[in-house]
Amino acid sequence: MMGIDLGVVSAVFRKDMRQYLGNPTGYVFLTLFIATTAAAAFLQDGFFARNLADLAELNAMMPAILMFFVPAITMGAWAEERRGGTDELLLTMPVRDVEVVLGKYLGVLGMYAISLAFSLSNVGVLMYLGDPDTGLMASTYLGYLLMGALFCAIGLVASMLTKNATVAFILGALGCAGLVFAGTQPWASGLLGAALVGAAAALTTFALTNKGSAAGIGGLVGGLAATFAWLVAGRGSETATETETATEAGAEAATEVGADALRDGNSFADLFDALSVTDHVASFGEGVVRLGDVLYFAGGIAVLLYLASFLLGRRHW
């Protein structure tokens, strides 16, 4: 399969799964995940008020839950390897970068899948209380799986950026939060867009110069340029009357217009509304599996795994 040694992928996967399941922390995570999802599904007034055997309450909370729980799985995937020096041993072996990345990714995804499987107890509760639609439950959990798989890829990239597991958790949570909140508020989509442009500029600069300092400067410049474009787009959306008023009022009014760009929708922020993971997972909770939503998750995972391979490949430069 494209020259990938599945034996290497399987070896890395098994190694990471043994690490997760051979550590008491893994079982603490499982317990917390089951308890949190059960509380979100059933310990809310809305569940009994609706009197329907579905997981609508959990659907609304699941993106926020995974925003924290998935980075907790992935934070040590590569950060701990680097901190302990075992990454050097792994990388000196005759393996390809993509094989290591796939093995690591499948390891964190496997742990998440096990957690999700245990949370099927929520469906058991629904079956006890009523008669849930099996097709709806299947599509709902497919949505959970795809969303978690995307967040696992984000967390893996975050873990490759630092030796500190805590920092990796924070970076992963911020990356997931960007997709969760995008589309909910224009300012959230604008911030996500500025961050993505800055990250792309940093990676491009690094690929051209192979210097971390240059990449940092490139990312800063790209992020500032994107922020400027965001503010200009927001200001451009004001009516001619508002623009004239802002000009006459001077600097104070101009500042208010800039603040409006953060609050109100504009063309720049609208470009990144489509990245909202909440919008793409919502249809699964309604029993509808759309091709566009599946491609969103699959494409995002592919891009992030390619980025992880790129970051890992720096050792060859």
Image (cartoon, helix red, strand yellow):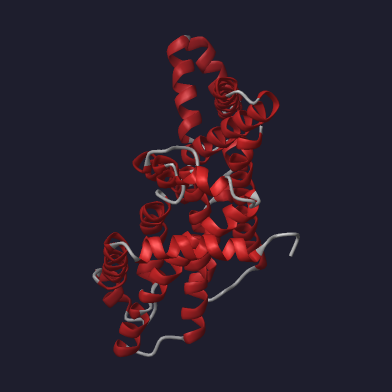
| Residue 20 picture quarter | bottom left
| Residue 233 picture quarter | top right
Left or right placement of residue 210 versus residue 183 in this view: right
Left or right placement of residue 74 versus residue 307 in this view: left
Residue at (57%, 46%) from the top-left corner?
91
Residue at (52%, 56%) from the top-left corner?
104
Residue 195 versus residue 109: which sits nearer the camera?
109
Q: Name above or below for residue 157 compared with residue 108.
A: above
Q: Name above or below for residue 46 compared with residue 158.
A: below
Q: Is residue 5 visible?
A: yes
Q: Look at the image and tell me in which quarter the N terminus lies.
A: bottom right
Position in image of residue 57 (x %, y %): 35, 68
Q: Look at the image and tell me in which quarter the C terminus lies.
A: top right
Left or right placement of residue 164 versus residue 230 in this view: left
Residue at (36%, 75%) from the top-left corner?
118
Residue at (56%, 16%) from the top-left corner?
244
Position in image of residue 228 (x %, y %): 57, 23
Residue 169 versus residue 283: which sits nearer the camera?
169
Position in image of residue 159 (x %, y %): 46, 44
